[in-house]
Image (tube, helix red, strand yellow):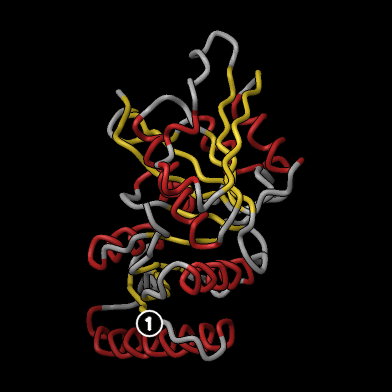
Amino acid sequence: MHAHRFETILVPVDFSEISAHALRTAQMLRQHCGGGDLLALYADRFEAPPYFTAGRLPELENEFRQSLQLAEESLQGFVRSTLGSDAAEARVVEALPADGIGKLAALKKPDLIVMGTHGRSGLNRWMLGSVAERVLRDSPVPVLTVRSAPRPRIERILCPVHDTALSRQALRLAAGIGACFDARLTVFHAVEAGGANPVADLCRWVPREERARCAIRELVRHGDASTEIVRLAAEEAFDLVVLGAPRRRFFDGMVLGTTTVRTVRHAPCPVLTVGGAIAE
């Protein structure tokens, strides 16, 4: 296995400081992992005021075209002011944010989505924003969520695993990113009460040639997986958490596992989730 290359990175933007952090994080990944394309997206749905009549449709269409043009100019300015001279394609779509992200992802087929997630105040301060949670739940490609300014480089990566194909996929991605940055990779399995047995020889999951590029350390802890992941990420100042994010069907939709949601909500660093097949 060699250093991972991101050919296309999609970054949803809402002009907030959090989305500026997401752009800078995507820029850092692009610079270290292959120099691919960066695509900034702003999605919003234009709705006609209730007092508009059919006879005023031409006026409405003109205002709509003007608003899209202004939004695109604003997005281009936001990208330039955030990334400096580093070029990125700017795209504005007329859709609800989660829908727009999903449609553009299906069209452009990015390797990665990088997006900011806003903390909420009061009782809901640890809840994810609805857009971020839906993208995490539905995205066919890995999603990196960020809440703060990126660090200069990724030096320490934490990859929690279970004995599943999805965990192996997440570990391969973590090792590839680690090779990009020459980062230290910690492979971690939490043994929960009543859960599965420890994973035997976690280091065997990583190809031999990759072990020479990354320092790999095995850890086993006992307790709730999400609690232990967040605690370890804080104790050892990890720069990135990479984990498999299994999904299961719930009525006519899909939901994320508890460990994924809690880790994304509480981890002190960016979390890269690798979505897997729906678990029935």
Report the residue that reaches farthest toward the top.
194
Crowding near pointer 1: few (<14 within 10 Å), some, many (20+)?
A: few
Residue flagged by tag 1: what amino acid is it? Glu
Q: Is residue 27 above or below residue 258?
A: below
Residue at (52, 54) in percent of width and height: 178
Using the image, determine if residue 222 lies above or below residue 84: above
Q: Nearer the viewer, residue 224 or 104?
A: 224
Q: Is residue 255 visible?
A: no
- In the image, residue 157 lies at what x, y percent? 59, 48
Residue 72: image quadrant is bottom left
Point out residue 143 in the picture as x, y percentages from the top left corner: 44, 53
Q: How many marks?
A: 1
Point out the residue furthest to the right here.
235
Res. 204 image quadrant: top left
Q: Nearer the viewer, residue 191 or 34?
A: 34
Q: Quadrant of the C terminus?
A: top left
Residue at screen point 66% across, 29% down:
228
x then y, percent, for residue 193: 60, 11
Residue 203 on image: x %, y % = 49, 33
Q: Is residue 60 visible?
A: yes
Residue, disc 1: 89
Residue located at (63% from left, 29% from top): 219
Front-lying residue, 151 or 39: 151
For this rendering, which residue is in front, 207 or 225?
207
Q: Callout 1: helix, strand or loop?
A: strand
Using the image, determine if residue 60 lies above or below residue 151: below
